Image (cartoon, rainbow, N blue to C red):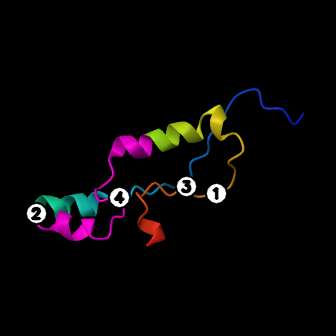
């Protein structure tokens, strides 16, 4: 190995969007569930899949070249409360 990369590789080992399938099902069956969840959401809304995808695209870009071995929370500030 020469220490140089000929291509770009992004290893995504985990991701968190703050909402998963179980939450989506709950929201579909309980109209008040979203309001209860928003109380705990610092930005006052739930995240969108596109927002998580944008973070993944950034991680794969040259602009994230110094980001190595970290977990990037894409959760609208949920972890800080």
Counting residues from the start of the chain, the first of labels 3 and 4 encountered is: 4
Marks 2/3: CA–CA distance? 30 Å
Percent x, y for residue 26?
18, 65
Q: Which residue is mark 2?
A: 29
How far apart are the alpha carbons under marks 2 and 4? Answer: 24 Å
Identify which residue is drawn at 44% across, 57% down: 16
Per the image, the residue denoted by label 4 is: 43
Earlier in the chain: of badge 1 and badge 4, it is 4
Task: Say which of marks 1 and 2 sits in front.
Answer: 1
* Residue segment shown in magenta: 32-53
Q: Which residue is at the far front?
A: 43
Disc 2: CA contacts within 10 A as few (<14), some (14-19) or many (>=20): few
Left or right of 49 on screen, residue 58: right
- Whichever of labels 2 and 4 marks the residue nearer the N terminus, that label is 2
Q: Position of residue 79 (x, y in %)?
A: 46, 68
Residue 49 included in the magenta stretch of the image: yes
Q: Secondary structure at mark 3?
A: loop
Q: Which disc, if any, is residue 72?
A: 3
> Closer to the observer: label 2 or label 4?
4
Between 6 and 34, the residue placed more toward the observer is 34
Cβ–Cβ under 8 Å for marks 1 and 3: yes
Q: Which residue is mark 1?
A: 70
Based on the picture, tell me whether residue 66 belongs to the magenta stretch: no
């Amino acid at each position: 190995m020469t220490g140089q990369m000929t291509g770009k590789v992004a290893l995504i080992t985990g991701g968190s969007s703050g909402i998963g399938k179980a939450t989506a099902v709950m929201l579909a069956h309980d109209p008040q569930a979203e309001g209860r969840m928003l109380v705990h959401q610092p930005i006052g809304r739930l995240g969108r899949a596109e927002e998580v995808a944008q973070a993944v695209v950034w991680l794969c870009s040259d602009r994230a070249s110094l980001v190595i071995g970290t977990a990037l929370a894409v959760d609208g500030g949920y972890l800080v409360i």
